[in-house]
Image: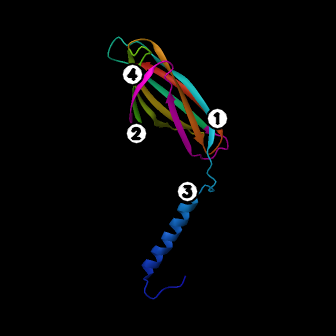
């Protein structure tokens, strides 16, 4: 690179760094960068609501695991969805904390209960290269019913996707 008489060495270095950063940004955001996401098999399950006789409810831990097929790091995008299945939901979503409060009504618009959901709130560490996320769901209900859920996953590598639900009464 030829040095201009009116440019200092600091200005030339800054210009080189800017040019490199712009090239990296173009490569990272390019559709041809090689970063392609695949739809991984969805997993599903149910959250059981048990009639609460006190003010205490239940805590459900939904843990989903993804093991990349080729054993290398992968970018992942998990998404959980609760399916009303004959119920009506009023949802308050705090996007900053990825928190949802879901109030549940039956088909006759009678109050049934609620759930607080912290989606993929805890990353589960594993030693075999498997990715794990834990969604925490707190429930309270005035009758017994269940709500199904589905977790979809997109990743940069194909692989296996599983789910486990653990429940405990407070």
The answer for how far apart the CA atoms under marks 4 and 3 are is 41 Å
Q: Secondary structure at mark 4?
A: strand
For the point 52% across and 70% down, the residue is 19
Give me the disc on residue 160: 1
Check disc 3 and report the residue beneath it.
29
The quarter of the image holding the N terminus is bottom right
The answer for how far apart the CA atoms under marks 4 and 2 are is 19 Å
Q: Is residue 129 visible?
A: no
**Viewer-side residue, 146 vs 106:** 106
Q: Are marks 3 and 2 in contact (CB under 8 Å)?
A: no
Check disc 2 and report the residue beneath it.
95
Check disc 4 and report the residue beneath it.
114
- Mark 3 or 1: the one toward you: 3
Q: Is residue 109 magenta?
A: no
Q: Quadrant of residue 49?
A: top left
Task: Name the spot of residue 105 as percent of width and height, x first.
Answer: 41, 18
Question: Label 2: few (<14), some or many (≥20) within 10 Å?
Answer: few
The quarter of the image holding the C terminus is top left
For the point 38% across and 41% down, the residue is 96
The answer for how far apart the CA atoms under marks 1 and 4 are is 32 Å
Disc with the residue nearer the chain's start (1 vs 4)? 4
The answer for how far apart the CA atoms under marks 1 and 2 are is 28 Å
Question: Label 4: few (<14), some or many (≥20) within 10 Å?
Answer: many
For the point 65% across and 38% down, the residue is 159
């Amino acid at each position: 690179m030829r040095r201009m008489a009116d440019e200092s060495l600091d200005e030339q270095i800054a210009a080189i760094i800017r040019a490199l950063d712009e090239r990296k940004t173009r490569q990272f955001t390019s559709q041809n960068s090689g970063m392609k996401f695949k739809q991984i098999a969805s997993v599903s399950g149910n959250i059981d609501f048990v009639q609460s006789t006190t003010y205490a409810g239940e805590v459900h831990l939904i843990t989903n695991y993804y093991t990349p097929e080729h054993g290398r790091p992968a970018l992942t995008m998990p998404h959980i969805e609760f399916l009303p299945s004959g119920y009506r939901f009023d949802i308050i979503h705090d996007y900053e904390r990825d928190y949802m409060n879901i109030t549940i009504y039956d088909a006759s618009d009678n109050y049934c209960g609620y759930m607080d959901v912290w989606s993929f709130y805890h990353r589960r560490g594993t030693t075999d290269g498997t990715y794990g996320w834990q969604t925490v769901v707190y429930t309270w209900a005035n009758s017994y019913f269940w709500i199904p859920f589905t977790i979809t996953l997109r990743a940069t590598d194909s692989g296996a996707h599983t789910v486990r639900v653990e429940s405990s009464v407070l």
